Amino acid sequence: MLMRDFLSYLWEAIPFRVVPATITTAVLVILLALPVPAGLTPDGKTMLAIFLTTIVAIILKVMPIGVMALMAMVILTFSQVTADNSSGAVADALSSFSSPLIWLIVTAILVSIGLRTTGLGRRLGMMFIAALGKRTIGIGYGLAFCELLLAPVTPSNTARGGGIIHPIMKSIASAFDSDPEKGTEGKVGTYLALVNYHANPITSAMFITATAPNPLVRSYLAEATGGAVDLTWGAWALAMLVPGLVSLLLMPLVIFLLSPPELKHTPDAVTFARGELRAMGPLHPKEIVMLLTFALLLLLWANVPAMILGPAFQLDPTAVALLGLFVLLVSGTISWNDVLAERSAWDTLIWFGALVMLAGQLNSLGVVAWFSGLMQGMITSANLGWALTAAVLVLIFTFAHYAFASTTAHISAMMLAFLAVGIALIPTAYQGFFLLMMVAASAIMMTLTHYATGTSPIIFGSGYVTMGRWWTVGLVMCVMELVVFAIIGGIWWKLLGYW
């Protein structure tokens, strides 16, 4: 009786999903049982099995991503695949938590609390609508520009697109009685929801602090090039500025053609936004502090002091983020309880740190070099030129996202190996173009599906867009943005001297 009650308790209490957990366990057992491939060491093969199992667990959503990351750390520690003793293995498992890149993204998430709690994010959105909202397409541009303004200091693209912009979009749609429950979503809601979503991947590509996996992308670039390419915050923003702005300018217009709203003229939107701004009243002191902190972060991340006063005044991006957080705390703009309660930041610390660690160990144990050699052999046998080689690698990497529900899982699983293959096969003079296209593709791939990133299920779940339309518009936007970044970006990167 006691055993039956205990087993019943376990069945109800254990938080993992049984079928995905069973599949994940089977994957680990099978991978460990396979013979060691030629060119790979036994430790490398075990490390690869741990990594692939972790990615499968994340894709299948066995448990929250943080728990799956912790699982990988536990397995790596007790298998002692990276060291000869337990203390060395646990040191390897925890090695990445001292990385400034990881603390940059965590601190930036904490800074972004102020946009939400002070109401500054909503105020900025309403200001854009008041200025541009006489036509539905103008509202679309207002939402897109608001996304762009918030992106540098909102490293959770889900918080930005789903938590700040989406409620603004829904409020505007409701003001025009555009409601999925009434069957009137086509008035303005479908169009605005699509713009709301598709601004998100573009702005995510434009700043290293615009989405959580971007520092991971940066670290992979540095690792794949032996430190030769290590994009600073300012270098990333400058490289992505022109193709990003062109994409952002084209996106609302292209969606207007693909999914035109029933209401083209919306003068009432201006009235609605102005009414909301009147209700908010003048800027509150906390909003002013947040605005000044926002401006300070942008200036320091862009290395303006170093440009004016010399390289001695160049600041590390993580140091800048810590300064911004400290200013918000000591000014009372956000509280320490706000920081402690921001679960997404601490969740990101765990899973992001674990995935950075896994990628580093894969490289250290020769797994990335082994896989890159296999891919390199296949592409070499096809006898492609550098341009086709770059195109094949970028396109395969991008459209593989149909199989992923997490940009982090996708980037962790594939990017480092693809970068290594490109560097091996593409002449040095053209590698800069390929590397920056891979950076852009790591965000552009979010356009494809309704499960592509955390923002997509929020907006798709609101009911304004059917799945068929979502996937159709997503494919068109993905291709369009890849073309813009390849052509406009290619010219811009040539002028900047990247290739």
Image: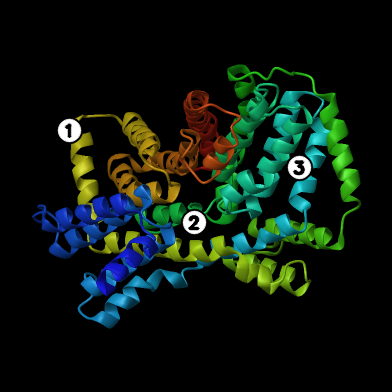
Colour scheme of the rendered structure? rainbow
Q: Quadrant of residue 50?
A: bottom left
Is residue 104 visible to the viewer in this orientation of the structure?
A: no
Corner quadrant of residue 289: bottom right
For the residues labelled 2 and 3, the Cα–Cα distance comes to: 27 Å
Label 1 sits on what residue type? Ser
**Between 345 and 176, the one nearer to me in the picture:** 176
Residue at the (44%, 46%) spot, across then down: 407
Q: Which residue is mark 1?
A: 381
On screen, 206 above or below 350?
above
Q: Nearer the viewer, mark 3 or mark 1?
A: 3
Of residues 289 and 136, the one nearer the viewer is 136
In primary-sequence order, the first of circles 3 and 1 is: 3
The residue mark sitting in front, 2 or 3, is 3
Q: Residues within 10 Å of mark 1 (few under 14, many from 20)?
A: few
Residue that carries the numbered disc 3 in the rendered image: 125
Q: Amino acid at mark 2?
A: Pro
240 to 72, vertically: above or below: above
Task: State which tag comes first along the sequence, 2 or 3.
Answer: 3
Quarter of the figure with the C terminus: top left
Q: Amino acid at mark 3?
A: Gly
Q: Nearer the viewer, residue 37 or 260?
A: 260
